[in-house]
Image (tube, rainbow, N blue to C red):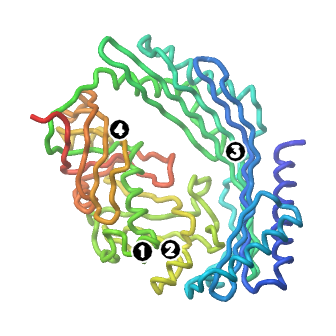
Amino acid sequence: MSLIKEIEIEESLLVNTVKKTLQLAFNQTTAIEVFIKKTIGISVNIRNGTLENVAFNSDGALFITVYNKFSKGSVSSKDFSVNGIKKMLEMAINISKYSSSDFFSGLPDIKLLCFHAMNLDLFHPWEFNLENAIKFCVLSEKESFKFDKRIINSEGSFFNSHVTINVFGNSLGVLEKYKSTRYSIYNCMIAQDKNSMQRDFDYSISRKINDLEPPETLGKKTAKRVISRLGSRKINTMKSPVMFSAEISHVFFSHLVSAISGDNVYQKSTFLINNLKTKIFPNWLNIKENPHLKKGLGSKPFDNEGVSTNSKYIIQNGILQTWLLNSYNARKLQLKSTGNCGGIYNWLVSNNNISFEELLKKMNKGILITELMGQGVDIVSGNYSRGAVGFWIENGKISYPVNEITISGNLKNMWNDILGISTDIDTRNNIQCGSILLSEMQISGISS
């Protein structure tokens, strides 16, 4: 049986499971939502040309939430049988009876729900072929070893292929579904010279197998990255311009996601609590969320509680336009859900229409950060401190690699200090952005 046929059968079974759950709950509770997510796929790992691991997975879970007036009961299980569903319903209803009443609990506003899920071109099945999956990994690693004799070892090459089916229904009449595919290849190598040993990695990810980078190309890119790290130096403590490379720019903006999430806002545990509709970025900077980007890695027709997703500006002309809300925290704030239950979608960050090389020239002298370490970000205060590695820039060009540094500042100042964003947009994450130049940050290295 072909993979497409198997997925169609599985999807039909999951839809029937949600229907059955809603039917069984009809006379037991007035408000219920049911969500099933199932992932089917294969993962392959090779190291130094040797197959280390092959994993086939078929994992799914049924989530049931019932509302007894303003009391909530939630359960989840991997048992999709009729008896299993009956037990889950009984348990969820019992939990709701003994839960504290919360006026803000309940199903979303019916006007916001998705009754017709749009096709976002997320499903591009590839017939699982173990031989080809292994070949992807072997070719990538082999190309890295060929690139330079200083590459002495591998931390592994990985290939993943997965199909995910999502089905959602509730007692307000919603019963919608969508499915998606995701493919990725990852390669991590180790290089050594007389003075040091370094590691680095690269990866490719897409909805469609043919959109992945060829494994040979990925192998060369990984090799170039790890070789460029050899000869890393320590630098003195100083204040300096800082540039975040495109591959980590999504991390830079991920702190904005936390700072404007509804839970943090209503709990007043964010440093942006008083900054809605105020300027927090340069006036040329825009961030637009587009959940309907075709084949987008962050695309969804509806969120985790069935609310329709919609395009919107997060930042427009430097001004914060919205919080990220689900139904519960929206009611807490006397606002409407923004359809962000479960996270963000495709954030498209504007740029200054200049190349990476031009942005380096604009910086002239400073640090190019290519990797971040640690979790030193406080969303309550906005204080920022993380370990980093990268390259020292002199006269607008890469001079030598640096390591064992810490960069620190405050996110409000950092966002206001953005001088430019280049066009080398990394599309491998929910946040798509080019390299980011900041006017100044504190760099902690060797005490002078």
Q: Label 1, on which residue?
A: 322
| Badge 2 density bin: few <14, some 14–19, many ≥20, Cα 10 Å | many
Tell me the quarter of the picture where residue 88 sits. bottom right
Q: Quadrant of residue 43?
A: top right
Badge 4 marks a residue whose secondary structure is strand
| Name of the residue lying farthest toward the left | 448
**Dot 2 and dot 3 residues touching (CB under 8 Å):** no
Percent across and percent down for residue 431 are: 46, 54
Disc 3 designates what residue? 162
Residue 355 seen in the current view: yes
Residue ID at (59%, 35%)? 185
Q: Indicate the position of residue 121 as horizontal and vertical percent values.
A: 67, 55
Q: Amino acid at mark 1?
A: Thr
Mark closest to the chain's N terminus, 2 or 3: 3
- Distance between the alpha carbons at the discs numbered 3 and 4: 29 Å
| Residue bearing mark 4 | 370
The residue wearing badge 2 is 325
CA gap between label 1 and label 4 equals: 30 Å
> Mark 2 and 4 residues: CB-CB less than 8 Å, in contact?
no
Viewer-closest of 238 and 6: 238
Q: Residue 364 at what x, y percent from top left?
A: 18, 39
Whether residues under marks 1 and 2 lie with C-beta atoms below 8 angstroms apart, the answer is: yes
Is label 1 in a helix, a strand or a loop? loop
Mark 2 residue type: Leu
Relative to 355, 147 lies left or right: right
Task: Indicate which disc, 1 or 4, sits on the residue closer to the N terminus.
Answer: 1
**The C terminus: image quadrant:** top left
Asked if marks 1 and 4 touch (Cβ < 8 Å), the reply is no
Residue occupying the far front of the picture: 98
The quadrant in which the N terminus is found is top right
Q: Earlier in the sequence, mark 2 or mark 4?
A: 2
Residue visible at 47% across and 31% down in the picture: 201
